[in-house]
Amino acid sequence: MVVRLGSLKINNMATTLSSKIVKIRKEHQCYSCYRKFPIGTQMNYWAGLYEGTFNACYSCLTCVQVMNMDTETEFPEGYVNEMLSKGESPEQLLERLK
């Protein structure tokens, strides 16, 4: 399954080279909520050019859903983390936004 994060095309500053769901082979931290995920978790891997520099990151599937629901055109590091109310999980945020 490929998740298209079309909104990551940021004013022609970002170009997606790869965006796909992968089963991680080592622990990774989500780019958007900063939670750590263990080996074997499915995450979205994004790789591309941002302002001419190659970048790659992993996002949890909950954060991908949140970003796909939002109308923002830019998703900086920690984007979902900044949206959370005190004590709220990304899953609770997703339910609140639906």
Image (cartoon, rainbow, N blue to C red):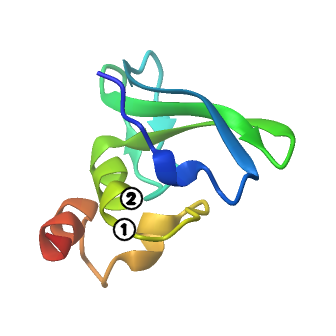
Which quadrant is the N terminus positioned in?
top left
Q: Quadrant of the C terminus?
A: bottom left
Residue at x 37%, y 32% (from the top left corner) = 43
Marker disc for residue 70? 1
The amino acid type of the residue labelled 1 equals Asp
- In this view, which residue lies farthest toward the bottom? 86
Residue 55 location, quadrant: top right
Q: Is residue 88 above or below residue 61?
A: below
- Horizontally, is 95 left or right of 71 in the view? left
Q: Please name the residue that numbered disc 2 is placed on.
A: 67
* 18 displayed left or right of 23: right
Name the residue rendered at 42%, 66% in the picture.
80
- Residue 60: image location, x then y, percent: 36, 43
68 left or right, relative to 48:
left
x and y, in percent, of residue 95 in the image: 12, 67
In the image, 1 versus 77, the foreground residue is: 1
- Could you classify mark 1 by the number of other residues whose Cα lies within 10 Å: few (under 14), some (14-19), or many (20 or more)? few
Q: Mark 2: which secondary structure? A: helix
Q: Are marks 1 and 2 in contact (CB under 8 Å)?
A: yes
Q: 51 above or below 83? A: above
